[in-house]
Amino acid sequence: MKERLLQMRAELQHLAPIGEEQAAVVELDQSRVGRLSRMDAMQAQAIAQETLKRRESKLLAITAALQRIETDNFGWCLDCDEQINPQRLALDPTTQYCIDCANRNE
């Protein structure tokens, strides 16, 4: 799992500069761009900003999972201290909760 998490982190970090560029402030020069084009650019910017937030959140989750691996706490639910189903971890190695606790927390 550690190798998979490291690979996930590397992929997200590789995409970071692209997302930051797309999330940059939209220039509102009316002489250069029409109204609809500006609206499209602003919508694309909002999508890029949300993608950037999700990427940062996933990077934090990956870092936390790597820390749990280092402290031998990986695979154990943070709420009930029961083992997380290995199939759940295979699907998302950053998961912190067993299925029962995850359902309760929603």
Image: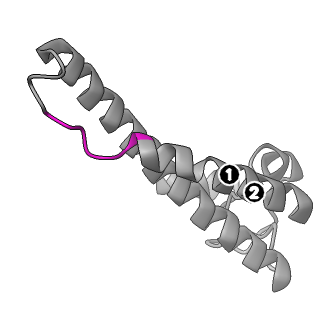
Q: Position of residue 71 (x, y in %)?
A: 81, 86
Q: Do the residues labelled 1 and 2 touch (CB within 8 Å)?
A: yes
Residue at screen point 82% across, 55% down: 7
Residue at screen point 61% across, 61% down: 59
Q: Position of residue 27 (x, y in %)?
A: 20, 37
Give whichever of 43, 17 is nearer the camera.
17
Q: Name the residue under label 1.
A: 14
Give whichever of 58, 75 is nearer the camera.
58
Q: Residues within 10 Å of mark 2 (few under 14, many from 20)?
A: few
Is residue 31 highlighted in magenta? no
SS for tag 2? helix
- Residue 28 shown left or right of residue 97 in the figure: left
Q: Where is residue 6 in the image (x, y as percent from the top left)?
A: 81, 62
Residue at screen point 73% across, 49% down: 11
Give whichever of 89, 45 is nearer the camera.
45
Q: Name the residue under label 2.
A: 10
Can you name the residue that lies furthest to the left here? 30
- Residue 40 shown left or right of residue 77 in the figure: left
Q: Is residue 103 visible?
A: no
Q: Can residue 64 be seen in this view?
A: yes
Q: Which segment is the magenta one?
A: 22-28
Q: How many numbered circles are shown? A: 2
> For the residue marked with disc 2, what is the amino acid?
Ala
